Image: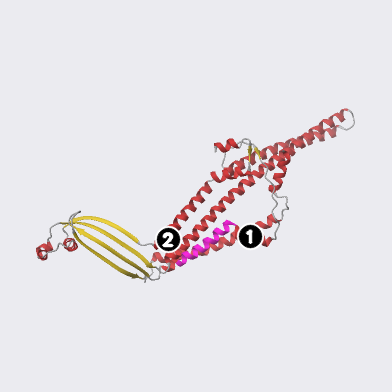
C-alpha cells in the first residue's frame, strides 16, 4: 500500500482506486478463496469415477489358533503334523510378512456420482458468480465514494465563490452606508448573508473530510492523504425500454446467476440423495503374498468379485440428507425471487434520471475546476 499511497499523492484516478480496493478487500479475498475451494471440490468429485487401488505391507506374529492355522495355509507351509490336536489347540507362535494389493471400483451407483459431479460443477459456477458479484459491490462502493469526493470538492468551490461574493457585497454595502446611500439595516442584512456563506463553506469542508473518510474505507487505504482526483470521464448509456433493461439485468447480473446455479445445484443434490436408495454395483479384488520372512518365499492368493447392494431399510443418515437437500432446494428459489424483485426496482430508479448521471455530473463539475 505504500507504493499506492506515494503514487496517489499527485493525482488519484478511479482505476487506481478500484484496483487497490480489489487488492485490499478481505471480502474479495474470501470470495476468491471460496472460488478456488469450489474448483477443487469439482475436481475431487470426478475422482469418484476412478477405481481405488491400495497397497499394504503388514508384519504380524502371534499364536492365536485361527491366526496360526490361516497363516500356515496362506504361506503354503501347512503339513500333516499341523493337524495334530495339540498343534491345533496350542500352536507355536508364527510370524507373517504380508504384501497386499487391493482394488475397488463402483460400476453403478444409480447415477449418484454423476449427479454429485453435476452438483459440484453448478456449485463452482455459483461461487464464481458470487465472487464476481462481490467484486462489483466493491467497485460500486469505490465509485460512489470517489464521486462523492468530486461533488464535495465542487461544493467547496461554489461555497468559496459565494463567500467571496458575500464579503465583497458586505464591503460595498458598508461604503454605501458611510456615503448615506443605504440604511444601516441593509449593512446588517449583508453581514448576516456573509456569515451564512461562511457557515456553508465550513459545512462543505466538513463534507469533503467525510467524503475522503468514506473513500479511504472503500479503498481499504486508511493512510491515504487527500489529493487531487482525476475527473471521471462522462459516459452516455443507451436509453432502453424498462423491460429490456430488466431482461438484460436478469441475464447478466452475477448475483442472480449465482442464485440460479445454486438452485440447479440443490436440485442435483436432491437427485444424488435419492440415488442412495437405488442399487449399487461394485467390483473388488485383491492379491496377497504371505511369507515367513521379509525376503523369503511363500504363498500368494487372490480374490475378485462383484457386489450388488441395496439399502432396504433406508438408513437414517440417507433420509436426513435427503430432507436437508429438499429444504435447501425450497429456500433457494425464494432467495432468487427476492433478488429478482430487487433488480426490477433498480432499473426504475435509474430510468428516472436523465443523461446527466451522477458520474457524468461529477466529472463535468470537477473538470470545470481545472
The structure residue drawn at horizontal position 29% and vertical position 61%, both measured from the top left corner, is 102
The structure residue drawn at horizontal position 44% and vertical position 63%, both measured from the top left corner, is 116
- What residue is disc 1 on? 248
Instruction: Point out residue 159 in the picture as x, y percentages from the top left corner.
Output: 74, 38
Magenta stretch, residue numbers = 253-271
**Residue at the extreme top:** 178
- What residue is disc 2 on? 46
Is 241 displayed left or right of 42 in the figure? Answer: right
- Main SS of residues in magenta: helix
Is residue 339 or residue 307 the one in the foreground? 307
Q: Secondary structure at mark 1?
A: helix
Dividing the image into 4 quarters, which one contains the N terminus?
A: top right
Write down the quadrant of residue 194 in the picture: top right
Is residue 328 or residue 245 the one in the foreground? 245
Dividing the image into 4 quarters, which one contains the C terminus?
A: top right
Few, some or many C-alpha atoms within 10 Å of disc 1 (few <14, some 14-19, many ≥20)? few
Of labels 1 and 2, the one closer to you: 2
N-terminal-most mark, 1 or 2: 2
Is 340 displayed left or right of 105 in the figure? Answer: right
Amino acid at each position: 500500500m505504500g507504493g499506492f499511497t506515494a503514487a496517489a499523492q499527485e493525482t488519484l484516478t478511479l482505476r487506481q482506486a478500484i484496483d487497490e480496493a480489489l487488492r485490499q478487500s478481505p471480502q474479495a479475498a474470501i470470495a476468491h478463496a471460496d472460488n478456488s475451494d469450489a474448483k477443487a471440490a469439482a475436481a475431487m468429485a470426478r475422482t469418484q469415477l476412478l477405481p481405488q487401488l491400495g497397497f499394504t505391507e503388514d508384519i504380524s506374529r502371534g499364536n492365536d489358533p485361527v491366526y496360526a492355522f490361516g497363516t500356515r495355509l496362506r504361506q503354503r507351509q501347512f503339513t500333516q503334523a499341523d493337524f495334530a490336536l495339540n498343534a491345533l489347540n496350542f500352536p507355536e507362535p508364527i510370524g507373517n510378512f504380508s504384501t497386499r494389493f487391493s482394488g475397488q471400483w463402483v460400476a453403478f451407483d444409480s447415477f449418484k456420482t454423476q449427479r454429485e459431479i453435476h452438483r459440484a460443477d453448478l456449485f463452482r459456477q455459483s461461487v464464481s458468480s458470487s465472487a464476481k458479484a462481490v467484486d462489483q459491490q466493491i467497485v460500486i462502493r469505490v465509485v460512489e465514494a470517489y464521486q462523492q469526493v468530486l461533488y464535495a470538492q465542487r461544493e467547496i468551490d461554489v461555497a468559496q465563490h459565494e463567500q467571496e461574493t458575500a464579503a465583497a457585497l458586505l464591503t460595498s454595502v458598508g461604503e454605501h452606508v458611510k456615503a448615506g446611500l443605504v440604511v444601516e439595516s441593509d449593512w446588517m442584512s449583508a453581514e448576516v448573508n456573509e456569515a451564512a456563506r461562511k457557515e456553508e463553506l465550513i459545512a462543505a469542508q466538513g463534507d469533503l473530510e467525510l467524503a475522503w473518510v468514506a473513500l479511504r474505507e472503500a479503498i481499504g487505504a486508511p493512510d491515504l492523504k487527500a489529493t487531487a482526483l482525476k475527473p471521471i470521464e462522462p459516459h452516455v448509456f443507451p436509453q432502453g425500454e424498462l423491460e429490456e433493461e430488466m431482461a438484460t439485468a436478469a441475464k447478466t447480473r452475477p448475483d442472480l446467476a449465482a442464485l440460479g446455479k445454486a438452485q440447479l445445484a440443490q436440485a442435483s443434490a436432491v437427485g444424488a440423495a435419492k440415488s442412495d436408495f437405488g442399487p449399487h454395483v461394485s467390483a473388488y479384488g485383491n492379491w496377497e503374498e504371505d511369507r515367513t520372512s521379509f525376503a523369503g518365499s511363500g504363498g500368494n492368493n487372490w480374490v475378485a468379485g462383484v457386489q450388488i447392494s441395496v439399502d432396504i431399510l433406508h438408513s437414517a443418515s440417507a433420509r436426513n440428507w435427503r430432507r436437508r437437500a429438499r429444504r435447501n432446494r425450497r429456500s433457494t428459489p425464494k432467495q432468487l425471487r427476492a433478488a429478482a424483485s430487487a433488480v426490477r426496482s433498480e432499473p426504475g430508479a435509474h430510468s428516472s434520471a436523465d443523461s446527466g448521471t451522477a458520474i457524468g455530473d461529477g466529472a463535468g463539475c470537477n473538470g470545470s475546476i481545472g
